[in-house]
Image: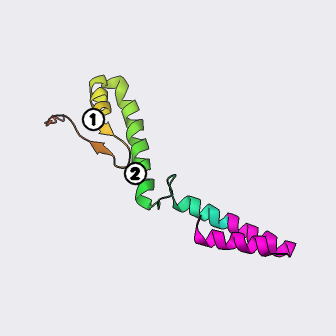
């Protein structure tokens, strides 16, 4: 548990005044909300690059869905060699020379 939240929990337990106790509980909840937005599901710091990486992943998947009906081979190729996770990567098994017309 975060030290700040732990200290607030101790203050909450010691507080006798119901109004003050409610105010401390609100501080705890607000701090927890801020912490949950600032960390990922593993408790590690979330940065803006995570947000943009996820957006790019979603957009690539949308585009793949649009490619599939018209270019099933290209779709299969990208599905095989694109990976999404901590890093979005494209790693074909051999060098490809693209012929774009």
Quadrant where the N terminus sits is bottom right
Q: Which residue is mark 1?
A: 81
Q: Which residues are magenta?
A: 1-29
Q: Where does the image place residue 90, in percent across and percent down from the top left?
A: 26, 41
Viewer-closest of 37 and 73: 37
**Quick check: 59 above or below 24?**
above
**Quick check: 80 above or below 17?**
above
Is 60 positioned to the left or the right of 24 in the image? left
Viewer-closest of 94 and 97: 94
Q: Is label 2 in a helix, a strand or a loop?
A: helix
Q: Is label 1 in a helix, a strand or a loop?
A: helix
Is 46 positioned to the left or the right of 84 in the image? right
At 38% from the left edge and 36% from the top edge, which residue is drawn?
63
Instruction: Say if the magenta span includes residue 40.
Output: no
Please tell me how crowded label 2 is: few (under 14), some (14-19), or many (20+) other residues with Cα within 10 Å.
some
Q: Earlier in the sequence, mark 2 or mark 1?
A: 2
> Magenta stretch mostly in which secondary structure?
helix
Q: Where does the image place residue 64, in percent across and percent down from the top left?
A: 37, 33
Q: Which residue is mark 2?
A: 53
């Amino acid at each position: 548990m975060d030290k700040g939240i732990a200290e607030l929990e101790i203050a909450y337990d010691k507080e006798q005044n119901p109004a003050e106790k409610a105010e401390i509980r609100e501080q705890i909840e607000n701090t927890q909300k801020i912490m949950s937005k600032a960390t990922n599901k593993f408790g590690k710091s979330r940065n803006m690059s995570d947000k943009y990486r996820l957006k790019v992943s979603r957009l690539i998947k949308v585009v793949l869905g649009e490619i599939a009906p018209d270019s099933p081979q290209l779709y299969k190729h990208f599905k095989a060699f694109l990976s999404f996770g901590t890093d979005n990567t494209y790693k074909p098994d051999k060098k490809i020379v693209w012929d774009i017309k």
